[in-house]
Amino acid sequence: MQTIEQTVRELVRQELTRLLPPLSQSSDPDQLLSTAEVADLTTLSKPYFEIGRSQGNKGLPPYFKIGRRVLYRRGDVMSWLENRRRGQK
């Protein structure tokens, strides 16, 4: 039997899923994404990008630093992923 809190969490999760399109469905290459959104999109962890940036890793997608925020262009992330594709094209 679910608690009230679990039921509410599940209802909120379902409603958010219905209202917000998944990141991978958007096709605007100029859309700006946070590190968390890029991590979700690429299935990599947030620390992968955070640590890579702090170590000056040139193998990461380009990003914007605006104040304390770090933002990535969707098109840059998708190009970065495509450049890592292996096998037949």
Image (tube, rainbow, N blue to C red):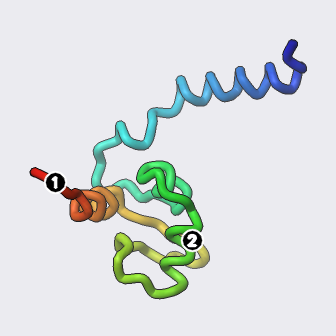
Residue visible at 45% across and 87% down in the picture: 56
Label 2 packing within 10 angstroms: few (<14), some (14-19), many (20+)? few
CA distance for labels 1 and 2: 35 Å
Residue visible at 53% across and 23% down in the picture: 18
Above or below 6: residue 28: below
> In this figure, what is the number of numbered marks?
2
Query: Which element carries disc 1, helix, strand or loop?
Result: loop
The residue that label 2 is drawn on is: 69
Q: Amino acid at mark 2?
A: Arg
Query: Which element carries disc 2, helix, strand or loop?
Result: strand
Q: Position of residue 32 (x, y in %)?
A: 42, 58
Q: Amino acid at mark 1?
A: Gly
Which residue of the protein is positioned furthest toward the front in this rendering?
87
Q: Which mark is residue 53?
A: none
Residue visible at 58% across and 67% down in the picture: 47
Q: Is residue 38 left or right of residue 31?
A: right
The residue that label 1 is drawn on is: 87
Q: Is residue 19 left or right of residue 6?
A: left
Q: Position of residue 53 (x, y in %)?
A: 49, 79
Foreground residue among 69 and 42: 42
Residue visible at 89% across and 20% down in the picture: 3
Q: Position of residue 39 (x, y in %)?
A: 50, 56
Q: Is residue 2 left or right of residue 15?
A: right
**Quadrant of the rendered structure where residue 16 is?**
top right
Q: Position of residue 79 (x, y in %)?
A: 24, 61
